[in-house]
Structure formats: structure tokens, C-alpha cells
Amino acid sequence: MLTDFAIRVEVVHIPVMLKEVVAYLEPKPGGIFVDATIGCGGHSREILAGIRPSGQLIGIDQDQEALALVRKGLNEYSDNLFLVNDNFRNLKNILADLKINSIDGILFDLGVSSLQLDTLHRGFGIKHEAPLDMRMDKRSRVSAFELVNKLPLEEISRILRVYGEERFHARIARAIVEQRKRNPVMTTTELADIAVKAQGYHKFYKIHPATRTFQAFRIAVNDELASFEAALKEAVGFLNPGGRVCVLSYHSLEDRIAKNIIRDFEKQGCLRRLTKKPLQPLQTELSQNPRSRSAKLRAAEKV
Ligand SMILES: C[S@@+](CC[C@H](N)C(=O)[O-])C[C@H]1O[C@@H](n2cnc3c(N)ncnc32)[C@H](O)[C@@H]1O
């Protein structure tokens, strides 16, 4: 029986562009697929329905809480589903351990899940007071607290500029360093306040003015971009001819990596783009799931 927590998760996490992802991945009975970011299992459930009765789905997530929940949530598919608590950058070793040499498709649905955003103590959300954590993988030793309170000013400024594309990076970095001279920055709300005050809050902001600061630290804590770049390149090598790769990204840094890698493989004659331009959610999806608003889907096929 699902716990209250699991029921809440089922209700809150809505898989993004589900129909489109499944249409591009084309799961077929007997196929071997990888969901590199299984999260709450929304996309995986549909993939599993497509590969049954004999197919295999390898579901990877570095988040222990997500895996524990998805194990229960997808219990009915336990014969076809192999769950792995690891970083997808270790794809090669993960597949080697399972004695899998090639796959028919792989999905990367990047970033954080609603489970992570809405579990207040994990420190991903801007609006709720929580310790500065932001680790997707609890085994990792570096949390946002360490980065915010220990990195030199120039490095904080670089993180905000590169990972947050934050134009006020220098001001916010200086404000963080000033604040921590008095007291360490302990919570999400303290960090958000510093970022807001450093910029001067204006009503015309479309997004919360600390959004880019939070994105930047989250990417740095989890080394998100380097992991994705390495894993996407690795994944293409495992695809069978006709095999598919789908990437759902949520900000321009992720999308740029996907775009460039797919384009480079296409130039080498290794991949064929299925989406010339990235697909975005339809208005109906946006109204049902506002969190899908920044999503972009790219898909390609192994030649
Ligand atoms: C947007 S959610 C996926 C949601 C999922 N598609 C669903 O429908 O429920 C992203 C998930 O990927 C995981 N993740 C992000 N980066 C990862 C990495 N480098 N390795 C493994 N898991 C990762 C996160 O922990 C999170 O659970």
C-alpha cells in the first residue's frame, strides 16, 4: 500500500511531454531501454507498458528517496525493471554490471523532480525555509552550504555567471561574502534574501529574482552539466541502429549541450535528428502543469 508521502508524490509529479517522449522513444515489446532519470517513474511507466512482456528497462537515479518510492510505485513491473541508484555519468559501468552491450533507447529528463522541489528539507525550493542542501545524492559530501560559505568570492561569482547566467553575479557574490563574514548563510530563505537585496527587487521580474542563484548553486552542487555531457556522449555509443535518444531539458545550458552533441554526432553520420527544432509543451499541458513551461524536447535516432 502506498504511504501518504507516495500518494502525494503521485499527485504532484506530472511527467512532462509524456506522449511526445513515448512517441519518439518508440518502446517495443522485447526492447531494452534506459530511463537515466527515473525520478517518480512517470515516463518509465509508459515505457514499461510498451516493452512488456519480455523487455527490460534500466531505471537510474542518484536520489535515494526517488528510487525507494519508484520501487513501490512500479512494483507491478518488477520483472522488467532494474533500478540502479547511481549517477548516469556511470552509464558504461551500470550497463556492464547488467551485462548489457546495446540498448534500443534512452531518456534523459534532466534537472529536479517535483518530489525534490516540494520536499522542503532538501533545500531546492526558494520560498520555503530549509537548510542549504540541494544534493540530489545524499552520499555526496558537498552541499550548497559548503559552496556558499567556503568558496572564494571569484568562484561564487563564476558559478552565478556560468551556471545561472545571472547578470548580477558580481553583486550577489559580494553580498554573500559580506553576509558570511558576520554569520554563515544557513538557509534557503537567507540565500534568497541576499540575492534579492543585492539586485534590488523590481515588480517587473517574471520569475523570482533568486531563481538564477538557486539554479547556479544546484548545478554546481550536483555537477549537472559535466555529468550530462559525459553521459549523453556515452549513451550514443550503446544505441542499436534505429535506437532513440530523447532529452528533456529545462534551461538553455542543458539544451545547448544536447543540441551541440546531437549535431556533432549527426555530422559524423552517427545520429539523425528527429526534431530539427526542440519541441515545447502544448498549451493544454502548460495549463495543467505550469512546471513544464521551460521544457524542451530533442530526439535523435542512431543511424
Ligand atoms: C525531472 S526528474 C525526472 C522525472 C521522471 N521522468 C518522472 O516522470 O517521474 C529528474 C530526476 O533525475 C535525477 N537526476 C538528475 N541528474 C542525475 C544524474 N546525473 N544521475 C542520476 N540521476 C539524476 C534527479 O534525482 C531526479 O529524480
Image (cartoon, helix red, strand yellow):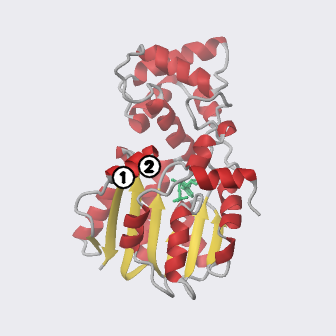
Position of residue 32 relative to residue 85, above or below, is below
Rendered image: mark on residue 284: 1
Q: Residue 229 location, x and y as percent?
A: 42, 57
Q: Residue 82 location, x and y as percent?
A: 64, 74
Report if residue 231 is visible in the image: no
Q: Quadrant of ligand 1?
A: bottom right
Q: Residue 3 location, x and y as percent?
A: 76, 55
Rendered image: mark on residue 175: none
Q: Is 248 situated left or right of 10 in this image?
A: left
Q: Is 182 situated left or right of 15 in this image?
A: right
Tell me where residue 192 sits by quadrant: top right
Front-lying residue, 168 or 12: 12
Q: Residue at x 39, y 69 (%)?
A: 245
Q: Tell me the kind of residue under disc 1.
A: Thr
Q: Quadrant of the C terminus?
A: bottom left
Q: Residue at x 56, y 62 (%)?
A: 38
Tell me where residue 67 sits by quadrant: bottom right
Q: CA distance from mark 1 to mark 2?
A: 6 Å
The image shows a total of numbered marks equal to 2
Q: Residue at x 32, y 54 (%)?
A: 282
| Callouts 1 and 2 close, C-beta under 8 Å | yes
Front-lying residue, 223 or 273: 273
The residue where tag 2 is placed is 288
- Is the CB of the residue bearing disc 1 within 8 angstroms of ligand 1? no
Position of residue 241 relative to residue 267, above or below, is below
What kind of element bears circle 2?
Answer: helix
Report if residue 270 is visible in the image: yes
